[in-house]
Amino acid sequence: MGSSKANAIVAQSGGPTAVINSSACGVIQEAMKSDAIERVLGATNGILGVLKEDLFDISAEREETIDALKRTPAAAIGSCRHKLKSLEESRADFERILEVFKAHNIRYFFYAGGNDSMDTADKVNKLAADSGYELVCIGVPKTIDNDLACTDHCPGYGSVAKYVATCAMEAGMDTESLYTYDTCTILEVMGRNAGWIAAATGLAAREPGEAPNLIYMPEAAFRWDKFVNDVKEVHKELGRVFIAVGEGLKDENGDYVTADSGSFGKDSFGHSQLGGVADMLKVVIEKEVGIKARWNKLGTNQRNAMHFASLTDVNEAYMCGQAAVKAAMGGVNGKMVTLVREDGPKYKCTTGLAELRDVANGEKKVPKEYINKAGNGITEACKDYIRPLIKGEAPVTVGEDGLAVFMRFERKPLEKKLPEYM
Amino acid sequence: MGSSKANAIVAQSGGPTAVINSSACGVIQEAMKSDAIERVLGATNGILGVLKEDLFDISAEREETIDALKRTPAAAIGSCRHKLKSLEESRADFERILEVFKAHNIRYFFYAGGNDSMDTADKVNKLAADSGYELVCIGVPKTIDNDLACTDHCPGYGSVAKYVATCAMEAGMDTESLYTYDTCTILEVMGRNAGWIAAATGLAAREPGEAPNLIYMPEAAFRWDKFVNDVKEVHKELGRVFIAVGEGLKDENGDYVTADSGSFGKDSFGHSQLGGVADMLKVVIEKEVGIKARWNKLGTNQRNAMHFASLTDVNEAYMCGQAAVKAAMGGVNGKMVTLVREDGPKYKCTTGLAELRDVANGEKKVPKEYINKAGNGITEACKDYIRPLIKGEAPVTVGEDGLAVFMRFERKPLEKKLPEYM
């Protein structure tokens, strides 16, 4: 690229987190320091924004706005779930991406997302190389699910872990208070394939008997008869039961636990899957154990809980963004930044790099040694792994009205130069 | 009672809140200062604990434990939903309560709860007077529902209001980020008869277009056709829709909105009421508006969110507890402490007193002037009413592990003196 400056683009993809904006902030602030980069552009709604040439000039935003990204949840640039297929099947889209990059002299592509996004970045990178367009693609890890390969953990996980553990603790105090009436509480958390979020609720139980008493993760095959027995046992011992469950619970065949899975499920209610897994557990508990059960489903609130986010997570997310730009400036291409946990008694985390395609093709589930033998809880090793990630409270700017103050971009749109995306 | 000292008892009733323990702390710390009171006793699990003579000596607890009540959610003494009927129907129970009080020289009864609890306290008080047992009964208001008569607002409401508004804001940022995929988000909050909690989510929308876009409360008769139209209009304007809904939504006949209410509801799914109102709205939106919808149900987490509670609420709850003891010492009996909002441009709140029976027989719903004409949002007058209640962030003790530290009583049980409760 010689000595002429080029533009960089930042895009966010998939489900928002409390800290994906902190990563964006790391990219933006580091990129704006670089002599090689003229302007930092944002792609409104991820790769969809690139395809639609819906870009805006982040460099033109106020410094305070950019800095407030560290304290703002969700995806401020805009996200999407637009999945590109193989280079052959989605060729027109991949070529369109390159055309947009060329039209706006974009030579650096920083993409924050999960494995699908790393796959997209990898393919854009390959097409650019094949067509002789100089482009640097660097991935920034992001997912509350913590299921990316090649990295010790994922930015976004520490904050969701801190929040769901807090929710388990607080709703657990409720169950302790009112067990004579609300005897059983079920906390449903996210995680369609990996149980990392459900596992994190286990940090709430500092002492035996504290909530959650039972944790069910997709990695431990779910059996209705065993479940009913677990609940009966805890109820007998404590007079109350607090259950944390990952939404993607699976049976011994690896199928999602739905209304049709197993005799307890099927007998208890005859409707197709409405509500979620917690609703099903409630029905079975009330029928088979004979105690009142209720449930909470945190939904998207768990992935945006900036008001009690992990400072460690916010800082590491920022570090990943910075490291992406530093890598790009250092001549790296086609890699994703990873988080590396250093050996030693004290937690220390640095960054590394992994091939985009290795991340794209991998998935990290909760390993066996992190799940207890009964398949209804986590081990000390699991707690040791998660604990450092939730430490510290991220600063929140609270307005005079008692509510958090979040930033929004002014979004000065870039003039479109290409025909409309079809 | 002359110059001899007597014991006081504190009991908590109904659904926990973030600040009912702060009220208990106010009662306990003030009572322990009083020359008239020998020991402060706790009734484990509310009136059930009294009936079962399941009492413990709070005065014997460590000072730090008692002080930490201010920073601990749920009902640390223990709560219940054991409802007593009329003096005639539940005569044996009411007499048992007095027997327990007599057996432990309890002359002061401080009862924190809602209108049912005030009813119970009133009847205990009457029976005591009839039977010539000197007893002072003072009620302490408590309910996240904010529906108690005679008081400007209820301790517990400010904190739930702050939390649900925060949740609306954060999940709203998520919807803004990902509307191309997750186009509509529904936040289901508590409130079976009153829409105060749903109303509070409206504080999140500082600017037009910000979440929540639509708020549905039990006080505004719900119509499926109007609802579908509301959602279509917001979607057309913004490309996304964020809805807050109180669980106790009612139709024009005052019946709860269930699967059987109205053609949209009935046509869309053929199962009996599983899940909640948000689940039903989702199904109707997907079918009738044709956009993807998802929902969050905060459940018991909203009433225990100590990690982001209102400092105003915590302080006022404490003040109510203190005022209850001061009133008792001042010769007041048969009253509940109320919160009184002083006139003037600056919010100032003091305490007053109301007859227990007036609170027992009343219910305060969201008034017409707080609901917009379309019945799908709140007015500025409503915001002005709620705003001061959520101000300030209550201090949280966070441990080195990044999670809140809550207190638990040691619970030194009092020796039982009576035959077992049947």
Image: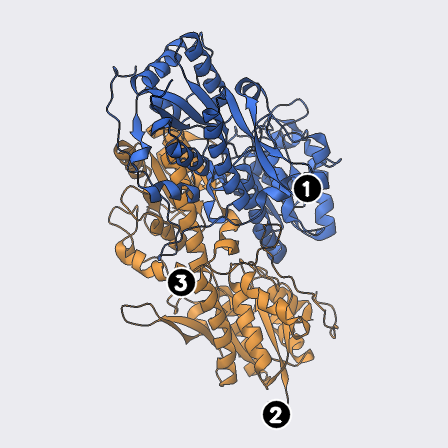
Chain colours: A orange, B blue
Marked residue chain, label 1: B
SS for callout 3: loop
Residue B253 sits in quarter: top right
Question: Residue, x 49% and y 78% (percent of image)?
Answer: A334
Residue ID for mark 3 = A363
Marked residue chain, label 3: A
Q: Amino acid at mark 2?
A: Ser
Q: Amino acid at mark 3?
A: Glu
Coordinates of residue A310 in the picture (x, y in percent): 44, 59
Give the number of the mark in front: 2 or 1: 1
SS for callout 2: loop
Tell which of A105 and A163 is nearer to you: A163
Coordinates of residue B346 in the picture (x, y in percent): 67, 44
Do the residues bearing badges 2 and 1 touch, measured as CB atoms within 8 Å? no
Estimate how packed mark 1 is, as few (under 14), some (14 to 19) or many (20 or more) residues with alpha carbons within 10 Å. Answer: few
Give the number of the mark in front: 1 or 3: 1
Asked whether residue A40 appears in the rendered view, the answer is: yes
Tell which of A182 and A219 is nearer to you: A182
Residue A48 sits in quarter: bottom right
Residue ID for mark 1 = B384
Q: Amino acid at mark 1?
A: Asp
Asked whether residue A211 appears in the rendered view, the answer is: no
Q: What's the mark number on residue A3?
A: 2
Coordinates of residue A110 in the picture (x, y in percent): 55, 73
**Would you say A409 lies left or right of A315 here?**
right
